[in-house]
Image: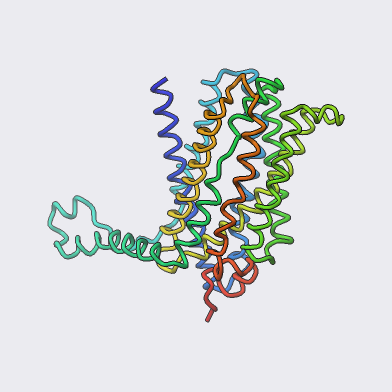
Amino acid sequence: FTITIISLLLSSASIALSDVVADGIVVQKTREASERGDDAIAGGLQSLCWGSAAIGAFISAYFSGSLLESMSPREVFGIASVLPLLVSGISFLMQEEPIGKKISNGDIQNGEVNDFEIEQAEATVGEQMSSLWAALRQPNIYKPVLFLFLWKATPTSDGAVLYFMTNDIGFGPEFLGRARLVTAASSLVGVFLYNQYLRRVPIKDVLFWTSIASVPLGLTQLLLISHYNRELGIPDGAFVFGDDVVFSILGEFAFLPTLVLAARLCPPGIEAVLFATLMSIYNGASTVGTEVGAALTKSLSVTETDFSNLALLTIICNVSSLLPLVFIGWLDGVGDESQEEMEAKGIDGFDKE
């Protein structure tokens, strides 16, 4: 058991590290395209990347469940481990221009560089960290960051609902795989709809109304928990599929504006580092929300077999998602523009020369 936990921890940490690096590269390329006047690339790169991720999720979603029907978990993990190795191989094809002069240990030992050159190379990291801290201390950056943290850190009941679907309703791995397939396909639809209609809407308005809409839609899970959907003639499977479609689309409507907002917050020179930091904070907030949801689940005595208080847990988690809207004023200024308006001015919000 301990070896499994350590392996999962190292795997998750490695994926998280590569994820934030990739996010930083996307912001850097977006800014470079914006400086060249290539608005088509600058505006659509975020959507392209996350659309590609949704395609990958779509391809793998069904097999994640169906493989477990015919293979052991060890064999499935073995197959899945090949994909990160492919990503590692592709990373060698990336072309990067180093910031500052590279100094190897051999050069230092051979006396080919002096102390000043070593200090100059080491100062690059120090200056970046200093610039990062200075940026995070600015009210127009830390206030939106705090709002996004609170917005993402609200509790969720996903773990308890998963137990309910498997232990009470009786859904198996194959069905859950098909549900993930539907979710991934819906995410692609959400990316398309956002680019078609919502990229012209101010980011603050998109976040506000998606939060408002998520509450009544989230409460529809009470129909499934109480099995009232069966009295309405809606099968459990069809209800779950419909729920996944709506929430996946709504999730893309809420997630894509946060990427655009994060990209805009990054000042020139440290865009990659700051964006990676913002995404780390964003993912950390998601973990906080999961842990708070787990604490609520335990306090309400919801277990893998006792779902008597699952309805109350669902209500608390959904209603609490409205609490961060009290601080939506922290997005004033930086979130008052739409993605299209930001593209016209450049992703960082300054007029192009």
Image quadrant of residue 277? bottom left
Query: Going by the image, does 288 lie left or right of 241?
Result: left
Extreme-right residue of the structure: 233
Q: Nearer the viewer, residue 289 or 260?
A: 289
Query: Going by the image, does 168 lie left or right of 152?
Result: right
In this rendering, the answer to whether 167 lies above or below 123 is above
Query: Going by the image, does 272 lie left or right of 109?
Result: right
Q: Nearer the viewer, residue 51 or 170?
A: 170
Query: What residue is shown at x 74% (from left), y 28% (from top)?
Result: 226
In this rendering, the answer to whether 113 lies above or below 343 is above
Q: Nearer the viewer, residue 158 or 244?
A: 158
Residue 338 in picture, x, y percent from top left = 64, 67
Query: What residue is shown at x 57% (from left), y 74% (from top)?
Result: 37
Colouring chosen for the image of the structure: rainbow
Residue 44 in picture, x, y percent from top left = 62, 61
Query: What residue is shown at x 23% (from left), y 53% (from top)?
Result: 104
Residue 65 in picture, x, y percent from top left = 65, 26
In this rendering, the answer to whether 209 lies above or below 71 is below
- Report the number of discs: 0
Query: What residue is shown at x 13% (from left), y 53% (from top)?
Result: 110
Q: Quadrant of the N terminus?
A: top left
Extreme-bottom residue of the structure: 353
In this rendering, the answer to whether 148 lies above or below 64 is below
Residue 142 in picture, x, y percent from top left = 44, 61
